[in-house]
Amino acid sequence: MAGEVCVQHPEVAAAYRCDGCGKLLCVDCMRKGHALLFCTLCGERALPLHEGQPASARELRRHEVVSRPYSFAEALGYPFRGSGKLMFAVSVFCLLFIQLALKYGIGYYQYVIAFGFWSLMIGLQFSIVRSTAEGENELPDWPDYSAFGERLADILTYLAIVVLQVGPAAVYLLLQKDSLVSGEPSVIFWAGFAVLAWLGSALATMAYGAAGRFGRGSSLRLDLHVRGFLLGGADAVNAANLMFGFGIAFFVLRLALDKVPIAGAILGGIVGAYWFFTSAHLAGVLFRRHIFQFEKLYE
Amino acid sequence: MEPTGKPRTVVKCEKHGLHYDSARQSGCVICRREAGELPGAPAAAAARPAAGVDGPRGSIGAALAVTAVLIAVAAFAMLPVHATFIEWLRGRENQNAFETAASRHNQKQMEGALKELKEQSSGGGAVRPPGDEP
Protein backbone atom coordinates (compact mmCIF):
# COMPACT_ATOMS: atom_id res chain seq x y z
CA MET A 1 0.00 0.00 0.00
CA ALA A 2 1.56 3.32 -1.09
CA GLY A 3 0.31 5.25 1.98
CA GLU A 4 1.97 2.87 4.46
CA VAL A 5 5.58 3.51 3.56
CA CYS A 6 8.01 5.97 5.14
CA VAL A 7 7.94 9.41 3.57
CA GLN A 8 11.74 9.48 3.29
CA HIS A 9 12.31 5.78 2.62
CA PRO A 10 9.63 4.34 0.31
CA GLU A 11 11.16 0.85 0.60
CA VAL A 12 10.50 0.82 4.34
CA ALA A 13 7.09 0.31 5.96
CA ALA A 14 5.92 3.27 8.01
CA ALA A 15 5.50 2.71 11.74
CA TYR A 16 4.56 6.25 12.89
CA ARG A 17 2.67 9.30 11.71
CA CYS A 18 3.75 12.80 12.68
CA ASP A 19 1.06 14.60 14.65
CA GLY A 20 2.26 17.94 13.15
CA CYS A 21 3.13 17.51 9.46
CA GLY A 22 1.13 14.29 9.08
CA LYS A 23 4.05 12.48 7.38
CA LEU A 24 4.43 8.76 7.67
CA LEU A 25 7.70 7.81 9.35
CA CYS A 26 9.85 4.75 9.79
CA VAL A 27 11.82 4.26 13.01
CA ASP A 28 14.87 6.00 11.48
CA CYS A 29 12.81 9.14 10.78
CA MET A 30 11.74 9.47 14.39
CA ARG A 31 13.82 10.36 17.47
CA LYS A 32 13.47 9.62 21.16
CA GLY A 33 12.86 12.54 23.52
CA HIS A 34 12.98 12.26 27.31
CA ALA A 35 9.51 10.75 27.46
CA LEU A 36 7.96 11.03 23.97
CA LEU A 37 8.82 10.22 20.35
CA PHE A 38 9.28 13.04 17.80
CA CYS A 39 9.31 13.50 14.02
CA THR A 40 12.84 14.30 12.80
CA LEU A 41 11.40 16.42 9.95
CA CYS A 42 9.25 18.93 11.86
CA GLY A 43 9.88 18.15 15.53
CA GLU A 44 6.25 17.41 16.40
CA ARG A 45 5.16 14.30 18.26
CA ALA A 46 5.26 10.99 16.34
CA LEU A 47 2.30 8.71 17.02
CA PRO A 48 2.28 4.94 16.39
CA LEU A 49 0.32 3.75 13.35
CA HIS A 50 -0.41 0.29 14.70
CA GLU A 51 -1.71 -0.91 18.01
CA GLY A 52 1.10 -2.47 20.02
CA GLN A 53 3.78 -0.19 18.51
CA PRO A 54 5.72 1.68 21.24
CA ALA A 55 4.12 5.09 21.86
CA SER A 56 6.64 6.54 24.32
CA ALA A 57 10.43 6.70 24.61
CA ARG A 58 10.33 4.26 27.55
CA GLU A 59 8.28 1.75 25.58
CA LEU A 60 10.57 2.14 22.59
CA ARG A 61 13.67 1.52 24.72
CA ARG A 62 12.06 -1.64 26.09
CA HIS A 63 11.03 -2.59 22.55
CA GLU A 64 14.63 -2.23 21.39
CA VAL A 65 15.91 -4.41 24.23
CA VAL A 66 13.44 -7.27 23.66
CA SER A 67 13.68 -7.12 19.86
CA ARG A 68 17.46 -7.60 19.72
CA PRO A 69 18.07 -10.53 17.35
CA TYR A 70 18.41 -13.71 19.39
CA SER A 71 17.78 -17.13 17.90
CA PHE A 72 16.74 -20.37 19.58
CA ALA A 73 20.13 -21.79 18.52
CA GLU A 74 21.87 -19.02 20.51
CA ALA A 75 19.56 -19.79 23.43
CA LEU A 76 21.04 -23.30 23.64
CA GLY A 77 24.37 -21.78 24.79
CA TYR A 78 22.66 -19.97 27.69
CA PRO A 79 24.15 -21.93 30.65
CA PHE A 80 27.71 -21.27 29.42
CA ARG A 81 27.42 -17.49 29.02
CA GLY A 82 28.86 -14.93 31.45
CA SER A 83 28.49 -15.91 35.10
CA GLY A 84 26.37 -18.87 33.95
CA LYS A 85 29.45 -21.10 33.60
CA LEU A 86 30.19 -20.87 37.33
CA MET A 87 26.54 -21.26 38.28
CA PHE A 88 26.25 -24.26 35.98
CA ALA A 89 29.31 -25.92 37.55
CA VAL A 90 27.96 -25.24 41.06
CA SER A 91 24.57 -26.69 40.09
CA VAL A 92 26.12 -29.87 38.66
CA PHE A 93 28.23 -30.29 41.82
CA CYS A 94 25.16 -29.76 44.03
CA LEU A 95 23.06 -32.18 41.96
CA LEU A 96 25.72 -34.90 42.31
CA PHE A 97 26.04 -34.21 46.04
CA ILE A 98 22.26 -34.47 46.46
CA GLN A 99 22.17 -37.73 44.47
CA LEU A 100 24.89 -39.23 46.67
CA ALA A 101 23.23 -37.92 49.84
CA LEU A 102 19.90 -39.47 48.85
CA LYS A 103 21.60 -42.77 48.08
CA TYR A 104 23.94 -43.09 51.07
CA GLY A 105 22.65 -40.51 53.58
CA ILE A 106 21.53 -41.37 57.08
CA GLY A 107 18.34 -40.14 58.73
CA TYR A 108 16.18 -37.40 57.24
CA TYR A 109 18.84 -34.72 56.75
CA GLN A 110 19.42 -35.60 53.11
CA TYR A 111 15.72 -35.06 52.33
CA VAL A 112 15.82 -31.62 53.95
CA ILE A 113 18.94 -30.70 51.96
CA ALA A 114 17.42 -32.03 48.71
CA PHE A 115 14.17 -30.13 49.30
CA GLY A 116 16.05 -26.89 50.00
CA PHE A 117 18.22 -27.27 46.92
CA TRP A 118 15.34 -28.14 44.57
CA SER A 119 13.20 -25.29 45.88
CA LEU A 120 16.05 -22.90 45.02
CA MET A 121 16.54 -24.45 41.58
CA ILE A 122 12.82 -24.11 40.82
CA GLY A 123 12.85 -20.49 42.01
CA LEU A 124 15.86 -19.91 39.77
CA GLN A 125 13.96 -21.36 36.80
CA PHE A 126 11.15 -18.84 37.20
CA SER A 127 13.74 -16.05 37.58
CA ILE A 128 15.36 -17.22 34.34
CA VAL A 129 12.01 -17.04 32.51
CA ARG A 130 11.31 -13.54 33.90
CA SER A 131 14.74 -12.06 33.14
CA THR A 132 14.86 -13.68 29.69
CA ALA A 133 11.43 -12.34 28.76
CA GLU A 134 12.69 -8.85 29.72
CA GLY A 135 15.65 -9.10 27.34
CA GLU A 136 18.40 -10.61 29.51
CA ASN A 137 20.60 -13.30 27.93
CA GLU A 138 22.61 -14.26 31.00
CA LEU A 139 21.65 -16.13 34.16
CA PRO A 140 20.02 -14.04 36.92
CA ASP A 141 21.01 -14.17 40.61
CA TRP A 142 19.85 -16.98 42.89
CA PRO A 143 16.42 -16.37 44.39
CA ASP A 144 16.07 -15.26 48.02
CA TYR A 145 16.95 -18.22 50.30
CA SER A 146 14.98 -16.91 53.24
CA ALA A 147 11.63 -16.34 51.46
CA PHE A 148 10.18 -19.75 52.40
CA GLY A 149 6.64 -18.88 51.35
CA GLU A 150 7.83 -17.81 47.90
CA ARG A 151 9.87 -20.97 47.46
CA LEU A 152 6.93 -23.13 48.53
CA ALA A 153 4.64 -21.33 46.07
CA ASP A 154 7.28 -21.88 43.37
CA ILE A 155 7.34 -25.61 44.10
CA LEU A 156 3.55 -25.88 43.91
CA THR A 157 3.51 -23.95 40.63
CA TYR A 158 6.27 -26.18 39.28
CA LEU A 159 4.28 -29.29 40.21
CA ALA A 160 1.21 -27.90 38.42
CA ILE A 161 3.33 -27.31 35.31
CA VAL A 162 4.78 -30.83 35.50
CA VAL A 163 1.22 -32.18 35.65
CA LEU A 164 0.41 -30.19 32.50
CA GLN A 165 3.56 -31.49 30.81
CA VAL A 166 3.28 -35.20 31.57
CA GLY A 167 -0.46 -35.38 32.29
CA PRO A 168 -1.80 -36.06 28.77
CA ALA A 169 0.81 -38.77 28.04
CA ALA A 170 0.40 -40.31 31.51
CA VAL A 171 -3.40 -40.57 31.11
CA TYR A 172 -2.84 -42.20 27.70
CA LEU A 173 -0.50 -44.81 29.22
CA LEU A 174 -2.95 -45.43 32.04
CA LEU A 175 -5.84 -45.98 29.63
CA GLN A 176 -3.68 -48.25 27.46
CA LYS A 177 -1.98 -50.08 30.31
CA ASP A 178 -2.97 -53.53 28.99
CA SER A 179 -1.07 -52.92 25.75
CA LEU A 180 1.76 -51.45 27.77
CA VAL A 181 2.31 -54.49 29.98
CA SER A 182 1.27 -57.37 27.73
CA GLY A 183 1.41 -56.23 24.10
CA GLU A 184 4.44 -56.20 21.87
CA PRO A 185 6.07 -52.77 21.39
CA SER A 186 4.19 -50.97 18.58
CA VAL A 187 5.21 -47.79 16.74
CA ILE A 188 1.58 -46.64 16.47
CA PHE A 189 1.09 -46.98 20.22
CA TRP A 190 4.20 -44.87 20.91
CA ALA A 191 3.34 -42.35 18.18
CA GLY A 192 0.10 -41.66 20.06
CA PHE A 193 2.13 -41.26 23.24
CA ALA A 194 4.58 -38.91 21.49
CA VAL A 195 1.78 -36.70 20.11
CA LEU A 196 0.34 -36.25 23.61
CA ALA A 197 3.80 -35.72 25.10
CA TRP A 198 4.41 -32.98 22.50
CA LEU A 199 1.10 -31.32 23.39
CA GLY A 200 2.10 -31.51 27.05
CA SER A 201 5.45 -29.87 26.22
CA ALA A 202 3.68 -27.10 24.31
CA LEU A 203 1.33 -26.42 27.25
CA ALA A 204 4.19 -26.55 29.75
CA THR A 205 6.25 -24.08 27.67
CA MET A 206 3.39 -21.59 27.76
CA ALA A 207 2.74 -22.26 31.46
CA TYR A 208 6.44 -21.77 32.35
CA GLY A 209 6.55 -18.50 30.45
CA ALA A 210 3.29 -17.24 31.92
CA ALA A 211 4.22 -18.20 35.49
CA GLY A 212 7.67 -16.61 35.21
CA ARG A 213 6.57 -13.43 33.45
CA PHE A 214 2.99 -12.80 34.60
CA GLY A 215 2.79 -14.50 37.99
CA ARG A 216 2.20 -18.00 39.25
CA GLY A 217 -1.60 -17.83 38.99
CA SER A 218 -1.46 -17.51 35.21
CA SER A 219 0.24 -20.91 34.88
CA LEU A 220 -3.14 -22.63 35.24
CA ARG A 221 -4.93 -20.59 32.53
CA LEU A 222 -5.13 -23.32 29.91
CA ASP A 223 -7.40 -21.22 27.68
CA LEU A 224 -4.81 -18.42 27.57
CA HIS A 225 -2.00 -20.91 26.94
CA VAL A 226 -3.84 -22.26 23.89
CA ARG A 227 -4.57 -18.75 22.55
CA GLY A 228 -1.01 -17.63 23.27
CA PHE A 229 0.40 -20.68 21.53
CA LEU A 230 -1.67 -19.93 18.42
CA LEU A 231 -0.54 -16.28 18.54
CA GLY A 232 3.08 -17.43 18.82
CA GLY A 233 2.81 -19.31 15.51
CA ALA A 234 6.06 -20.81 14.22
CA ASP A 235 8.02 -19.51 17.24
CA ALA A 236 5.72 -21.32 19.65
CA VAL A 237 5.91 -24.55 17.63
CA ASN A 238 9.73 -24.29 17.47
CA ALA A 239 9.94 -23.73 21.23
CA ALA A 240 7.64 -26.71 21.88
CA ASN A 241 9.74 -28.82 19.48
CA LEU A 242 12.91 -28.00 21.40
CA MET A 243 11.25 -28.68 24.77
CA PHE A 244 9.82 -31.98 23.56
CA GLY A 245 12.93 -33.13 21.65
CA PHE A 246 15.29 -32.39 24.52
CA GLY A 247 12.83 -33.82 27.05
CA ILE A 248 12.61 -37.17 25.24
CA ALA A 249 16.38 -37.25 24.58
CA PHE A 250 17.04 -36.48 28.25
CA PHE A 251 14.64 -39.24 29.38
CA VAL A 252 16.19 -41.90 27.10
CA LEU A 253 19.72 -40.78 28.00
CA ARG A 254 19.01 -40.96 31.73
CA LEU A 255 17.68 -44.51 31.34
CA ALA A 256 20.83 -45.49 29.45
CA LEU A 257 23.14 -43.72 31.92
CA ASP A 258 21.51 -45.40 34.92
CA LYS A 259 23.29 -48.61 33.88
CA VAL A 260 26.73 -46.96 34.21
CA PRO A 261 27.46 -46.50 37.94
CA ILE A 262 29.63 -43.38 38.49
CA ALA A 263 30.24 -41.86 35.05
CA GLY A 264 26.50 -42.27 34.36
CA ALA A 265 25.59 -40.30 37.48
CA ILE A 266 28.06 -37.51 36.57
CA LEU A 267 26.89 -37.31 32.95
CA GLY A 268 23.25 -37.47 34.08
CA GLY A 269 23.89 -34.56 36.47
CA ILE A 270 25.49 -32.46 33.73
CA VAL A 271 22.69 -33.16 31.23
CA GLY A 272 20.04 -32.54 33.90
CA ALA A 273 21.51 -29.18 34.98
CA TYR A 274 21.91 -28.08 31.36
CA TRP A 275 18.31 -28.91 30.54
CA PHE A 276 17.08 -27.31 33.75
CA PHE A 277 18.56 -23.93 32.78
CA THR A 278 17.94 -24.10 29.04
CA SER A 279 14.27 -25.14 29.16
CA ALA A 280 13.40 -22.11 31.30
CA HIS A 281 15.41 -19.86 28.99
CA LEU A 282 13.63 -21.19 25.87
CA ALA A 283 10.22 -20.42 27.42
CA GLY A 284 11.52 -16.94 28.26
CA VAL A 285 12.76 -16.36 24.69
CA LEU A 286 9.33 -17.25 23.31
CA PHE A 287 7.69 -14.80 25.73
CA ARG A 288 10.26 -12.11 24.87
CA ARG A 289 9.54 -12.39 21.16
CA HIS A 290 5.79 -12.07 21.68
CA ILE A 291 5.81 -10.03 24.87
CA PHE A 292 3.46 -7.30 23.63
CA GLN A 293 0.87 -9.79 22.38
CA PHE A 294 1.17 -11.90 25.53
CA GLU A 295 0.90 -8.87 27.81
CA LYS A 296 -2.48 -8.12 26.30
CA LEU A 297 -3.50 -11.75 26.70
CA TYR A 298 -2.34 -12.49 30.25
CA GLU A 299 -2.64 -9.10 31.95
CA MET B 1 11.88 21.54 26.01
CA GLU B 2 10.84 19.72 22.84
CA PRO B 3 10.65 21.62 19.50
CA THR B 4 7.14 22.36 18.27
CA GLY B 5 7.74 24.05 14.85
CA LYS B 6 5.36 22.91 12.07
CA PRO B 7 5.53 23.73 8.31
CA ARG B 8 2.28 25.10 6.82
CA THR B 9 2.93 24.15 3.18
CA VAL B 10 2.54 20.38 3.58
CA VAL B 11 0.41 18.90 0.79
CA LYS B 12 -0.59 15.37 -0.15
CA CYS B 13 0.70 13.72 -3.36
CA GLU B 14 -2.33 12.69 -5.43
CA LYS B 15 -0.48 9.83 -7.08
CA HIS B 16 1.08 8.15 -4.02
CA GLY B 17 -0.92 9.56 -1.10
CA LEU B 18 2.26 10.78 0.68
CA HIS B 19 2.67 14.16 2.38
CA TYR B 20 5.47 16.55 1.42
CA ASP B 21 6.44 20.16 1.96
CA SER B 22 5.60 21.86 -1.36
CA ALA B 23 7.66 24.96 -0.45
CA ARG B 24 10.87 22.92 -0.29
CA GLN B 25 10.26 19.81 -2.41
CA SER B 26 9.18 19.24 -6.00
CA GLY B 27 7.04 16.21 -5.13
CA CYS B 28 6.56 13.37 -2.69
CA VAL B 29 9.44 11.09 -1.89
CA ILE B 30 8.35 8.40 -4.35
CA CYS B 31 7.97 10.95 -7.19
CA ARG B 32 11.45 12.31 -6.37
CA ARG B 33 12.94 8.83 -6.13
CA GLU B 34 11.38 7.92 -9.49
CA ALA B 35 12.88 11.10 -10.90
CA GLY B 36 16.32 10.00 -9.57
CA GLU B 37 16.59 12.86 -7.06
CA LEU B 38 16.90 10.62 -3.96
CA PRO B 39 19.26 7.76 -2.95
CA GLY B 40 17.99 4.36 -1.70
CA ALA B 41 16.76 3.62 1.80
CA PRO B 42 19.24 2.93 4.62
CA ALA B 43 19.92 -0.79 5.09
CA ALA B 44 19.14 -0.71 8.81
CA ALA B 45 15.72 0.80 8.24
CA ALA B 46 14.96 -1.55 5.37
CA ALA B 47 15.85 -4.56 7.50
CA ARG B 48 13.64 -3.53 10.43
CA PRO B 49 10.10 -4.88 10.49
CA ALA B 50 7.37 -2.32 11.14
CA ALA B 51 5.40 -4.72 13.32
CA GLY B 52 8.20 -4.92 15.90
CA VAL B 53 9.05 -8.01 17.94
CA ASP B 54 5.68 -9.67 17.54
CA GLY B 55 6.05 -10.30 13.82
CA PRO B 56 6.18 -13.89 12.58
CA ARG B 57 9.61 -15.51 12.39
CA GLY B 58 10.11 -18.61 10.26
CA SER B 59 7.55 -20.74 8.55
CA ILE B 60 4.83 -22.55 10.47
CA GLY B 61 4.89 -25.33 7.84
CA ALA B 62 8.60 -26.00 8.42
CA ALA B 63 8.09 -25.92 12.20
CA LEU B 64 5.22 -28.45 11.97
CA ALA B 65 7.29 -30.67 9.66
CA VAL B 66 10.00 -30.72 12.35
CA THR B 67 7.28 -31.63 14.89
CA ALA B 68 6.19 -34.59 12.74
CA VAL B 69 9.79 -35.81 12.43
CA LEU B 70 10.35 -35.44 16.18
CA ILE B 71 7.18 -37.40 16.97
CA ALA B 72 8.26 -40.20 14.63
CA VAL B 73 11.77 -40.29 16.13
CA ALA B 74 10.32 -40.28 19.66
CA ALA B 75 7.95 -43.16 18.78
CA PHE B 76 10.88 -45.25 17.51
CA ALA B 77 13.08 -44.22 20.46
CA MET B 78 10.43 -45.50 22.88
CA LEU B 79 10.43 -49.02 21.34
CA PRO B 80 13.64 -50.20 23.05
CA VAL B 81 12.49 -48.49 26.26
CA HIS B 82 9.20 -50.44 26.06
CA ALA B 83 11.06 -53.70 25.37
CA THR B 84 13.32 -53.10 28.40
CA PHE B 85 10.27 -52.32 30.53
CA ILE B 86 8.51 -55.55 29.49
CA GLU B 87 11.70 -57.56 30.20
CA TRP B 88 11.95 -55.96 33.61
CA LEU B 89 8.27 -56.69 34.26
CA ARG B 90 8.65 -60.36 33.28
CA GLY B 91 11.78 -60.67 35.38
CA ARG B 92 9.84 -59.24 38.31
CA GLU B 93 6.95 -61.65 37.72
CA ASN B 94 9.39 -64.59 37.65
CA GLN B 95 11.01 -63.34 40.83
CA ASN B 96 7.57 -63.11 42.48
CA ALA B 97 6.67 -66.60 41.27
CA PHE B 98 9.99 -67.95 42.61
CA GLU B 99 9.44 -66.24 45.96
CA THR B 100 5.90 -67.64 46.19
CA ALA B 101 7.09 -71.18 45.39
CA ALA B 102 9.93 -70.89 47.91
CA SER B 103 7.60 -69.66 50.64
CA ARG B 104 5.19 -72.58 49.94
CA HIS B 105 8.09 -75.01 50.15
CA ASN B 106 9.21 -73.50 53.46
CA GLN B 107 5.67 -73.64 54.78
CA LYS B 108 5.38 -77.33 53.89
CA GLN B 109 8.66 -78.07 55.62
CA MET B 110 7.51 -76.23 58.74
CA GLU B 111 4.19 -78.09 58.74
CA GLY B 112 6.04 -81.44 58.41
CA ALA B 113 8.35 -80.59 61.29
CA LEU B 114 5.41 -79.51 63.43
CA LYS B 115 3.54 -82.72 62.65
CA GLU B 116 6.59 -84.79 63.63
CA LEU B 117 6.87 -82.94 66.92
CA LYS B 118 3.20 -83.48 67.66
CA GLU B 119 3.56 -87.20 66.95
CA GLN B 120 6.57 -87.41 69.24
CA SER B 121 4.76 -85.61 72.04
CA SER B 122 1.57 -87.75 71.69
CA GLY B 123 3.72 -90.99 71.68
CA GLY B 124 5.13 -90.13 75.16
CA GLY B 125 8.51 -88.97 73.94
CA ALA B 126 9.85 -85.89 75.69
CA VAL B 127 10.67 -83.01 73.49
CA ARG B 128 14.00 -81.58 74.41
CA PRO B 129 14.86 -78.03 73.55
CA PRO B 130 17.93 -77.72 71.33
CA GLY B 131 21.22 -77.93 73.24
CA ASP B 132 19.58 -79.78 76.14
CA GLU B 133 20.98 -83.21 75.26
CA PRO B 134 22.37 -85.25 78.15
Image (tube, coloured by chain):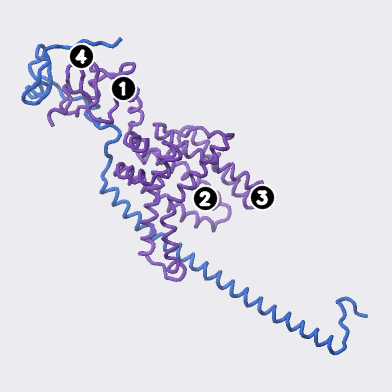
Relative side of B117 to B96, left or right? right
Residue A105 badge: 3
Q: Distance between the residues labelled 4 and 2?
A: 62 Å
Whole-percent x and y of residue A136?
Answer: 41, 32
- Residue type at mark 2 is Gly
Whole-percent x and y of residue B86?
Answer: 48, 68
Give the structural element (helix, strand or loop) at label 2: helix
Whole-percent x and y of residue B103?
Answer: 66, 76
Q: Nearer the viewer, mark 2 or mark 1?
A: 1
- Residue type at mark 4 is Cys
The residue positioned farthest toward the right in the image shown: B134
Q: Name the residue that disc number 2 marks.
A: A268
Q: Name the residue that disc number 4 marks.
A: A42
The image quarter in which residue B114 lies:
bottom right
Residue A56 badge: 1
The residue positioned farthest toward the bottom in the image shown: B123
Dot 3 and dot 2 within a common chain: yes
Would you place residue A37 above or below residue A130 in this image? above
Chain letter for mark 2, please.
Answer: A
| Dot 1 alpha-carbon crowd within 10 angstroms: few under 14, some 14 to 19, many 20 or more | many
Give the structural element (helix, strand or loop) at label 3: loop
Chain letter for mark 4, please.
Answer: A
Would you place residue A183 above or below residue A246 in this image? below
